[in-house]
Image (tube, rainbow, N blue to C red):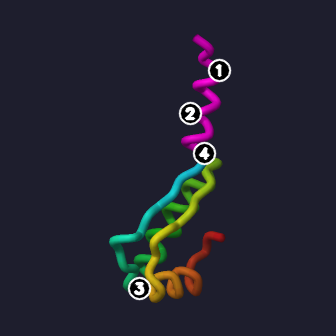
Amino acid sequence: MNTHYYDEILNFMVEYKVIDFGQAHVWDDSGVAAIDKIVLKLEESGKNIQLTGLNKPSSNLVNRLAIHS
């Protein structure tokens, strides 16, 4: 069994993360700060992060206040 192949797959899987907000609403700046804290921590450890499912008001708030890119 080639463990190198499985290591590469595992590395890819853990390098890319999707955070789904499909069932959530970000109400205020403290919610954006919590998202920033998580995203920045994961990016700091080399992860690529994608936020999905934000409703329009939440997306506008995150885009306006977030520190992360």
Instruction: Determine crowd level at label 4: few under 14, some 14-19, many 20+ residues with C-alpha closer than 10 A.
Output: some
Q: How many marks?
A: 4
Question: Which residue type does callout 1 highlight?
Answer: His
Residue type for callout 2: Leu
Residue where numbered disc 4 is placed:
15
Question: In the structure shown, which secondary structural element does the residue marked by tag 4 occupy?
Answer: helix
Q: Earlier in the sequence, mark 3 or mark 2?
A: 2
Work out which quarter of the rendered image holds the N terminus and state it.
top right
In this rendering, is residue 48 above or below 54?
A: above
What separation in Å lies between label 3 and label 2 (alpha carbons)? 36 Å
Label 1 to label 3: alpha-carbon separation: 45 Å
| SS at circle 3 | loop
Q: Earlier in the sequence, mark 2 or mark 4?
A: 2
CB contact under 8 Å: marks 2 and 1: no
Above or below, 66 relative to 61:
above
Point out the tag, 4 or 1, that comes first from the N-terminus.
1
Q: Which mark is residue 10?
A: 2
Disc 4 to disc 1, C-alpha distance: 16 Å
Assign a secondary structure to mark 1: helix
Query: Residue under circle 3?
Result: 28
**What is the x, y in percent for residue 43?**
61, 56
Contact? badges 1 and 3 (CB < 8 Å): no
The mark closer to the camera, 1 or 3, is 1
Say which label, 2 or 1, has the lower sequence index: 1
Q: Quadrant of residue 21?
A: bottom left
Q: Which residue is mark 1?
A: 4
